[in-house]
Image (cartoon, rainbow, N blue to C red):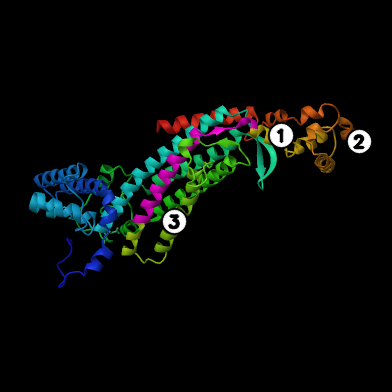
């Protein structure tokens, strides 16, 4: 049991208490960030005349040797230390002696852990953004390929109107574009450096917090030392954003599961992204999509858990806040894994165009267009709706589609109908004439594709 704080105690910590309190098993994840933060702190202390050049150099080389030894596996992070901060400091003192004891000057573990977590989360946001960009690029290429691939659009999971695969995928494109924007917003809002806030009330040393912030790539120092050590808003925002990404992935997964079902047969998931059954030889299951859908609850759980943890904590730091780590790490890992696998599954799945088109042809997906035909010939929409409703009923009795109903049947119910009704309700017309921006028609789609192309180019340059 190696602790930083034995002085005022007369007894050893109970072993169970020690284990209950310790965080090394999970905060060892940010050993790199902890060392990076310490290096910046030491440089600042030296610049301010609080440490000598020689002390600074000794500490910096000690810290870099710890970093490289951890990375090459010669120094193991063991649980004899309470947390990653104690591990680094104790190892530093072991290596360089007295100078190492000055590392923690003008600093508390409260501002240190606040910094480490921010540095770690910042890197993870960058990785998450890259994964979202890969997903967006995949969707974009798929959209370009499927501008004319017809499929039924649904409401209430009932066939509604025909759309294209590009249009359906485009809906997810918009969702993930917003997710990308949210990740950027969170990064910008959290990017202020808490180091130098001390335990809660700053410090009497003449720290240069602006300098530390600049060294660590922050936009500036945080402005209230109590808030700095107890702010977990950015984690709540991140978990909320991750939950939203999972909503989107989960809805998409649900659709893929439906499309892949024997009843629909709209798509084929690649063998490499499907699994079999131990008993039923014929089975090929969409387990990846199901797991993504299933893991969504776990990410929501993290958000709920942190919100609940934070709600009753008086200012400033309280140990409850240590609970932010495992759940945030787990949520980040889960979402990264889901984004990665989901994108690969998407990129390798194939659309069964004929089945999708055949499905779009039946189920009266052209009924609205038939009503619009009448409207274009001067019939008020409400009357047109009623007329087409009757014709649909007739077709259901005859077990045919509106496109198969003879013209005389049309004329019996309204003299307005002419031969051109068939053209007006063909699948091509229903889709290709819908060209207001945001609609599935190819002209509208081309415009959106151009916007998305520019969006992708812009974010890839950043
Ligand atoms: N392991 C702690 C955490 O994650 C670090 C801060 C400890 N500070 C303290 N005063 N005990 O929150």
Q: Is residue 441 above or below residue 84?
A: above
SS for tag 2? Answer: helix
Q: Main secondary structure of the magenta part?
A: helix
Instruction: Tell me the residue at 23%/65% (across/down).
Output: 18
Instruction: Tell me the residue at 68%/28% (across/down).
Output: 432
Which label's residue is closer to the chain start, 2 or 1? Answer: 1
Magenta residue check for 404: no
Whole-Å distance between the Cαs marked 3 and 1? Answer: 44 Å
Whole-Å distance between the Cαs marked 2 and 1? Answer: 24 Å
Q: Is residue 248 above or below residue 316?
A: above
Asked which quadrant contains residue 78, the reply is bottom left
Mark 1 highlights which residue? Answer: 361
Q: Residues within 10 Å of mark 1 (few under 14, many from 20)?
A: many
Instruction: Tell me the residue at 48%/36% (across/down).
Output: 271
Q: Is residue 436 visible?
A: no
Mark 3 highlights which residue? Answer: 303
């Amino acid at each position: 049991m190696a602790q930083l704080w034995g002085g005022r105690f007369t007894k050893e910590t109970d072993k169970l208490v020690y284990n209950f309190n310790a965080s090394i098993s999970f905060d060892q994840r940010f050993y790199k960030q902890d060392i990076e933060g310490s290096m910046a702190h030491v440089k600042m202390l030296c610049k301010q005349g609080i440490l000598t050049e020689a002390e600074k150099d000794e500490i910096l080389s000690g810290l870099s040797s710890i970093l490289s030894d951890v990375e090459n596996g010669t120094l193991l992070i063991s649980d004899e230390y309470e947390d990653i901060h104690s591990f680094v400091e104790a190892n530093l003192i072991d290596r360089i002696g007295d100078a190492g004891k000055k590392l923690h000057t003008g600093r508390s573990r409260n501002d240190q852990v606040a910094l480490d977590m921010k540095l770690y989360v910042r890197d993870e946001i960058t990785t998450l953004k890259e994964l979202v960009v890969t997903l967006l690029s995949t969707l974009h290429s798929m959209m370009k390929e499927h501008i004319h691939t017809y499929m039924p659009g649904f409401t209430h999971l009932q066939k509604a109107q025909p759309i294209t695969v590009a249009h359906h995928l485009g809906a997810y494109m918009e969702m993930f574009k917003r997710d990308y924007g949210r990740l950027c917003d969170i990064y910008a809002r959290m990017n202020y450096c808490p180091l130098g806030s001390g335990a809660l009330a700053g410090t009497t040393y003449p720290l240069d917090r602006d300098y530390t912030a600049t060294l660590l790539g922050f936009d500036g120092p945080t402005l209230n030392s109590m808030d700095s050590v107890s702010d977990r808003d950015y984690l709540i925002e991140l978990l909320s954003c991750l939950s939203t990404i999972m909503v989107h992935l989960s809805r998409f997964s649900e659709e893929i599961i439906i499309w892949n079902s024997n009843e629909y047969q709209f798509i084929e998931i690649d063998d490499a992204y499907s699994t079999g059954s131990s008993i039923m030889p014929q089975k090929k299951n969409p387990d990846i999509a199901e797991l993504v859908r299933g893991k969504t609850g776990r990410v929501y759980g993290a958000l709920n858990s942190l919100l609940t943890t934070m709600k009753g904590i008086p200012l400033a730091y309280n140990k409850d806040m240590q609970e932010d780590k495992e759940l945030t790490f787990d949520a980040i890992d889960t979402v990264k894994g889901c984004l990665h696998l989901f994108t690969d599954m998407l990129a390798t799945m194939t659309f069964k165009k004929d089945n999708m088109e055949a499905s779009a042809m039946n189920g009266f997906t052209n009924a609205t267009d038939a009503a619009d035909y009448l409207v274009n010939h001067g019939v008020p929409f409400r009357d047109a709706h009623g007329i087409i409703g009757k014709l649909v009923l007739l077709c259901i009795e005859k077990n045919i589609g509106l496109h198969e109903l003879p013209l005389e049947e049309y004329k019996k119910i309204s003299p307005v109908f002419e031969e051109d009704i068939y053209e007006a309700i063909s699948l091509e017309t229903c889709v290709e004439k819908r060209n207001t921006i945001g609609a599935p028609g190819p002209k509208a789609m081309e415009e959106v594709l151009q916007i998305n192309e520019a969006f992708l180019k812009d974010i890839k340059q950043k």
